[in-house]
């Protein structure tokens, strides 16, 4: 059939191989036929609620079958989904809902009160769909609250959904102003990206991928999209709280692929006896979010000697940019590789033209995976999307500094803005600073990133107390934890009598960043 939309992948596999396992979540197992039926029911129910083609539906769910059904159900209804981390706070949720004019929210029962509070500032949200209500007691998530499970019982078939050029998702990522920016992606953008990933990872229907990364994180989200695109099986875990359970799943579920970030690999390679387990099915590992050190690469390969390790680089605005073929690890351990299949990348000077090998410039990306722009942010869009080869084309300026070697392999150098990338998530310093400034006794706050081998960058806050005030770093961390997502909470808070300033009176962030990195290095020595 003609490729039309992301959910066509699911429909195709359900028709071609209906009894193949699609999802494994705890004790629950769904075949492709079962998943497709639930998606149909959810999509039909959304349309019956009045969700129209192109409208936005926010999804605030932990990893689980409900999240997968919601994502594909929204797509099949012709709408677009916005995945959000379940640790999001009410004020940020309210901002996102209002910014994208969401018409519905799908949430976990434990988040009903959060959604209710956020909806007070998001008048376009007409419905709240709550999953996981216990004992038939549906929590109040505001007007028109309905149970997720009830919608699946209604049955019915959805009307015609989306075209490949329609909006599929708005994925929010922090920007340099502190306000989250919505990355707009069409079905074509996301289908192309999933297909390119499937190609270089050589995924087949026989693959079984274990995902401990949240589906709200695009690295986790694409494990679902890739699995369905390839007709493979996805084993979903809610997180990485119990490493022993992950090892058990690797064996019991005959896992062939394991995506991770440096913190995951550090824990796994530190487990006693794991290197002695055979794990004969595990054929590949992937890493992104932060670069792996040569030591970490060695430890991973020693722990999983049968598996091929892929180092990768990407950003939400196009999902994936590059990957390092595993056979190049020994020769180029610090490289993030070459462009993914079907795309072009180059290191450019100020004029946008390629620079010579070894020279540093901004990385530009060309391909069908490049976003359409930021939602309702034309200036930010213009700064990232630049004129391409053809009059209708735009290329992505990543904002990241790179160099390339003589053979075209890429090496990350640094970032052109002050965004901190920690645990694979983008943290806007201003957003954290605003929370700190709201705390009692804080006169000034500056948030910087410190180089960290596991997190990529650790979020470090420097605070200047108000005159006569006493500031407790532990209390400030608790304050941040109450108002920010987990990954945004500073790893360290340092109190200084006065923050350094530049000659023009601004806070000297460079000095603080250097201090934070030096302090981290001294602590680990």
Image (spheres, rainbow, N blue to C red):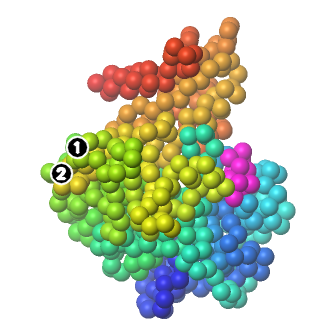
Task: Say whether residue 378 is visible.
Answer: yes
- In this rendering, the count of numbered labels is 2
- Report the front residue among 54 and 38: 54
Q: In the picture, residue 132 is in which quadrant?
A: bottom right
| Image spot of residue 452 (x, y percent) | 37, 35
| 93 inside magenta stretch | yes
Evaluate if marks 1 and 2 touch, with contact meaning CB atoms under 8 Å apart. yes
- Magenta region: 90-100
- SS label for mark 1: loop
| Image spot of residue 294 (x, y percent) | 22, 43
Which residue is under mark 1? 358
Q: Residue furthest top?
A: 468
* Image-based side of 441 in relation to 37, left or right: right
Q: Residue furthest right?
A: 143
Residue appearing at x 64%, y 82% in the figure = 161
Distance, label 1 to label 2, CA atoms, is: 8 Å
Which residue is under mark 2? 406
Q: Residues within 10 Å of mark 1 (few under 14, many from 20)?
A: some
């Amino acid at each position: 059939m003609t490729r039309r939309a992301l959910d066509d992948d699911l429909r195709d596999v359900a028709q071609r191989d209906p009894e193949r396992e699609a999802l494994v979540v705890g004790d629950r197992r769904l075949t492709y036929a079962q998943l497709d039926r639930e998606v149909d029911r959810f999509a039909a129910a959304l349309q019956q609620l009045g969700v129209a083609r192109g409208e936005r539906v926010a999804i605030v769910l932990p990893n689980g079958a409900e999240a997968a059904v919601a994502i594909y159900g929204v797509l099949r209804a012709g709408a677009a989904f916005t995945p959000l981390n379940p640790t999001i706070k009410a004020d940020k949720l309210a901002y996102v809902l209002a910014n994208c004019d969401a018409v519905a929210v799908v949430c976990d029962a434990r988040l009903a009160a959060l959604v209710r509070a956020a909806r007070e500032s998001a008048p376009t949200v007409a419905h709240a769909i709550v999953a996981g209500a216990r004992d038939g007691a549906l929590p109040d998530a505001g007007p028109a609250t309905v149970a997720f499970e009830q919608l699946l019982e209604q049955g019915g078939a959805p009307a015609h959904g989306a075209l490949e050029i329609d909006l599929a998702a708005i994925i929010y990522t922090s920007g340099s102003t502190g306000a989250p920016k919505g990355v707009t992606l069409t079905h074509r953008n996301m289908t192309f990206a999933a297909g390119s990933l499937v190609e270089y990872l050589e995924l087949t229907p026989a693959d079984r991928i274990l995902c401990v990364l949240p589906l709200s994180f695009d690295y986790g989200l694409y494990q679902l999209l890739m699995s369905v695109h390839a007709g493979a099986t996805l084993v979903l875990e809610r997180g990485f709280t119990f490493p022993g359970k992950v090892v058990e799943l690797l064996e019991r579920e005959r896992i062939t692929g394991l995506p991770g970030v440096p913190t995951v690999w550090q824990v796994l390679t530190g487990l006693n006896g794991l290197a002695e387990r055979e794990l004969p099915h595990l054929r590949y590992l992937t890493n992104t979010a932060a670069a792996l050190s040569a030591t970490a690469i060695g430890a991973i390969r020693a722990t999983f000697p049968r598996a091929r390790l892929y180092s990768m680089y990407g950003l939400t605005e196009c999902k994936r940019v590059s990957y390092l073929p595993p056979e190049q690890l020994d020769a180029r351990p610090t490289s993030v590789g070459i462009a993914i299949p079907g795309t072009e990348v180059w290191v450019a000077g100020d004029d946008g033209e390629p620079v010579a090998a070894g020279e540093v410039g901004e990385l530009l990306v060309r391909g069908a995976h490049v976003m359409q722009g930021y939602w309702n942010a034309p200036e930010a869009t213009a700064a990232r999307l630049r004129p391409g080869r053809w009059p209708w084309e735009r290329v992505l300026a990543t904002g990241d500094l790179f160099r390339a070697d003589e053979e075209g392999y890429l090496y990350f150098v640094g970032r052109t803005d002050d965004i901190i990338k920690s645990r694979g998530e983008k943290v806007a310093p201003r957003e954290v600073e605003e929370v700190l400034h709201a705390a009692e006794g804080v006169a000034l706050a500056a948030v910087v990133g410190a180089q960290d081998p596991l997190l990529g960058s650790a979020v470090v806050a420097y605070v200047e107390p108000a005159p006569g005030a006493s500031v407790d770093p532990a209390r400030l961390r608790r304050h941040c934890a109450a108002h920010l997502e987990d990954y945004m909470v500073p790893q360290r808070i340092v109190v200084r009598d006065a923050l350094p300033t530049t000659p023009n009176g601004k806070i000297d962030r460079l000095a603080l960043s250097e201090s934070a990195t030096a302090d981290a290095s001294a602590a680990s020595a």
